[in-house]
Amino acid sequence: MTPATPPADVLDRYFAQAVEATLEGLRAGDGGPFGATLVDPAGRIVVAVGNTVLRETDISGHAEMVAVREACTKLETLDLSGHVMYATCEPCPMCVAVMMWAGITTCFYASTRVDAADNGFSDLRLRRFLDGSDTSALDMIHLERGREDCAGIWTEFQRRNA
Ligand SMILES: [Zn+2]
């Protein structure tokens, strides 16, 4: 079931926080023009953050990623089920993945992937890789030999969780 979109004033408040965090970060040289607000199931803002790629020298410092990391730390949980992400721009597949890993099932976004691409932030290469239409960007090679070497990890994991 698709969740209901919040009332306009509530939506505006969440997006305003994300925009503010983004602009603050931009001015400080923290990172790219992206921000996100994460809201808990009761509608309270948990974090509002901007992109931190430059500040942290972290290629994965996208706003949604940062929001999930900070929220997990703040709330001391790996499970953000019921939380809702408000992103200034359509999240890239990496951020979609981290939201899914955290159990987030709703994300509202404003600018689109096309707006991002028009401003020099295209994630099309990644999208094409994931949909299988162009896998030339990354060679993913399965090694049967390595699989055997790594089998002990599974054994240790099972032993520890028995
Ligand atoms: Zn991203």
Image: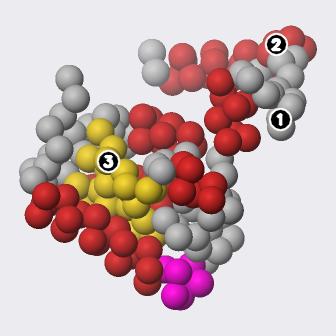
List the residue tagged with mark 3: 108
74 vs 153, left or right, is: left
Residue 72 seen in this snapshot: no
What's the distance in space between the residues labelled 1 and 2, CA to CA?
24 Å
Q: Does dot 3 land on a helix, a strand or a loop?
A: strand
Q: Looking at the image, is mark 2 or mark 3 earlier in the sequence?
A: 3
Q: Does mark 1 have its CB less than 8 Å from ligand 1?
A: no
* 155 vs 76: above or below: above
**Dot label at residue 11:** none
Residue visible at 54% across and 57% down in the picture? 115
Image quarter where the N terminus lies is: top left
Q: Give the residues drawn in magenta, as a range.
A: 25-30
Q: Tell me which amino acid carries mark 1.
A: Leu
Q: CA distance from mark 3 to mark 1?
A: 30 Å
Q: Main secondary structure of the magenta part?
A: helix
Q: In the image, which is nearer the foreground, mark 3 or mark 1?
A: 3
Q: Secondary structure at mark 1?
A: loop
Distance from disc 2 to disc 3, alpha carbons, whole Å, reads 43 Å
Q: Amino acid at mark 3?
A: Phe
**Residue at label 1?**
138
Q: Nearer the viewer, residue 118 or 50?
A: 118
38 sits left or right of 67 in the view: left
**Residue drawn where x is 83% and y is 37% of the image:** 137
Q: Position of residue 140 (x, y in %)?
A: 82, 27
Q: Is mark 3 within 8 Å of ligand 1?
A: no
Q: Which residue is mark 2?
A: 148
